[in-house]
Image: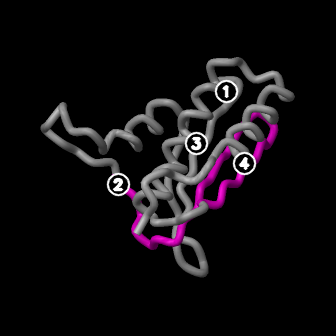
């Protein structure tokens, strides 16, 4: 059972912001990356039932890759709903619209990693 409040993700957000700022990324892409990270982090906590999701941030040349791992083997799928007033279910659609690529991979010893990539020169 999850606690009512998600774990603190501020350290991951601050590291991401510092890395992209040092690489002179535009503020709008930094904001997109932060929001996408937040969505994946909260999903890992809520749906993956991970009390402290593992975040890995890589910057390779002009491509940012962020992955968030949890212990659930269930790979995420964007929900489709006819109800526009539903309170949840839009997170992966948001990640898809904010990033250039996203997906998920099973982890060797259980669980999964959900990731996104952003290109600085896009």
Q: Residue furthest right?
A: 22
Region in magenta: 53-77
Name the residue beneath numbered marker 1: 30
Name the residue beneath numbered marker 3: 37
CA–CA distance in space, label 4 to label 3: 10 Å
CA–CA distance in space, label 1 to label 2: 25 Å
Q: Secondary structure at mark 4?
A: strand
Residue 58 part of the magenta-drawn span: yes
Task: Look at the image and tell me in which quarter the C terminus lies.
Answer: top right
Q: Secondary structure at mark 1?
A: helix
- The percent coordinates of residue 116 (x first, y second) are 57, 45
In the rendered view, tell whether residue 25 sits above or below residue 49: above
In this view, the mark in front (2 or 3): 3
CA–CA distance in space, label 2 to label 3: 17 Å
Q: Secondary structure at mark 2?
A: loop
Give the residue at x 56% y 61%. 113
């Amino acid at each position: 059972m999850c606690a009512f409040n998600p774990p603190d993700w501020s350290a991951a957000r601050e590291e991401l912001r510092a890395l992209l700022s040092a690489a002179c990324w535009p503020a709008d892409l930094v904001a997109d990356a932060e929001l996408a990270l937040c969505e994946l982090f909260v999903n890992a906590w809520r749906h993956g039932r991970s009390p402290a999701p593992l975040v890995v941030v890589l910057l390779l040349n002009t491509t940012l890759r962020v992955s968030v791992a949890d212990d659930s083997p269930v790979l995420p799928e964007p929900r489709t709903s006819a109800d526009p007033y539903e309170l949840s279910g839009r997170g992966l659609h948001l990640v898809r619209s904010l990033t250039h690529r996203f997906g998920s991979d099973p982890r060797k010893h259980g669980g999964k990693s959900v990731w996104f990539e952003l290109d600085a020169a896009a």
